[in-house]
Image: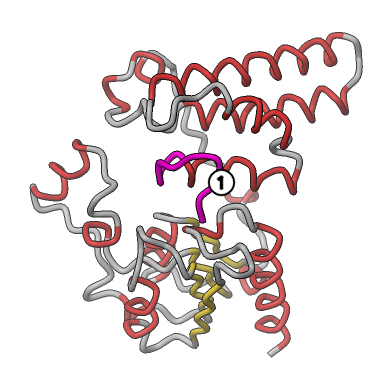
Amino acid sequence: MQFLFDDDTFSFEALRTTGFANYGGADLGEVLATASRITDGDQASWHRAWKATADRVAELGERSLAAGHRVTARENLLRASNYYRNAAAFVLDNPADNPEVASRPTLIYTSGYDSTSEECDRIAGFGYSLGGYLLARAAAFEHRLAALILDDGVHDLASGFADNLPPFLVTWLRDGHDYTLDGVADQILAPTLIMEGEHDTLLAGQPERVEKALTAAPTTRVTLTEREGAGEHTHAGALARAHQVMFDWLDTTRST
């Protein structure tokens, strides 16, 4: 599905950003106005346009907050955060060398025992894009999860994202760091929903490989289609449809 741009990557990122409108994360008018200022395929103009929109919307949110209007402040700041994320879509190929990232102090917070007392039989895991691989890998060793949702199913990083990895990751993988479910997939036990998009050019064939590899887990593989507007990678632009499948599956899985 082409959306606003002929460049496939620009089209996907614009569609993904717009898809968050269903949850207040974007406004169609802001997306269209921003897209009109972008030269198709020009990453610098993409960054300038989205950052300008993000700055403007963030300022609106700060004004509302200063005036005590917490609801509209939250709404504007949520959209701004999405636009800032989108502005950086093509400028973080090597985040370790990016001054905006490298200069930020970072705190890793680890909670105590009483912060992890949830009922394990009611905890499901959700993996989004590459997270579909990371969650599956973790679930091979952490068996307390009651269910898994892999959106999409990713069997191995190198073949799944071969043409879309930043250079530092390609080098890292070539140095022998294998990201694959080979040798561990049969240790995954939790019921697993494996999602895929009909037109997912990033991960074509990966969800099917995951389904075949999960020999010890009950699996359900669902393909969402272009006809229903949900055929892109991670169902960009069709979150309502994707979430319907996920939550209905969770309800059914929990009741069995």
In screen coordinates, is 32 left or right of 139?
A: right
At x 59% / y 64%, what residue is drawn?
A: 230
The crowd level at tag 1 (other Cα within 10 Å; few <14, some 14-19, many 20+) is many
Main secondary structure of the magenta stretch: loop
Q: Is residue 77 above or below residue 156?
A: above
In screen coordinates, is 153 left or right of 83?
A: left
The segment highlighted magenta reads: 1-10
Three-letter code for the amino acid on which mark 1 is drawn: Arg
Tell me the quarter of the picture where residue 147 sits: bottom right
Q: Is residue 64 above or below residue 176?
A: above
Tell which of 207 and 51 is nearer to you. Answer: 51
Residue 11: give x, y in percent of width and height.
Answer: 48, 44
Q: Which residue is mark 1?
A: 16
At x 52% / y 83%, what residue is drawn?
A: 220
Q: Is residue 67 above or below residue 101?
A: above
Tell which of 170 and 121 is nearer to you. Answer: 170
Question: Which quarter of the figure is the C terminus placed in?
Answer: bottom right
At x 37% / y 62%, what residue is drawn?
A: 133
Tell me the quarter of the picture where residue 18 sits: top right
Residue 244: give x, y in percent of width and height.
Answer: 71, 69
Give the tally of numbered discs.
1
Q: Secondary structure at mark 1?
A: helix
The outermost residue toward the right is 68
Q: Is residue 240 magenta?
A: no
Q: Is residue 69 above or below residue 152?
A: above
The outermost residue toward the left is 175
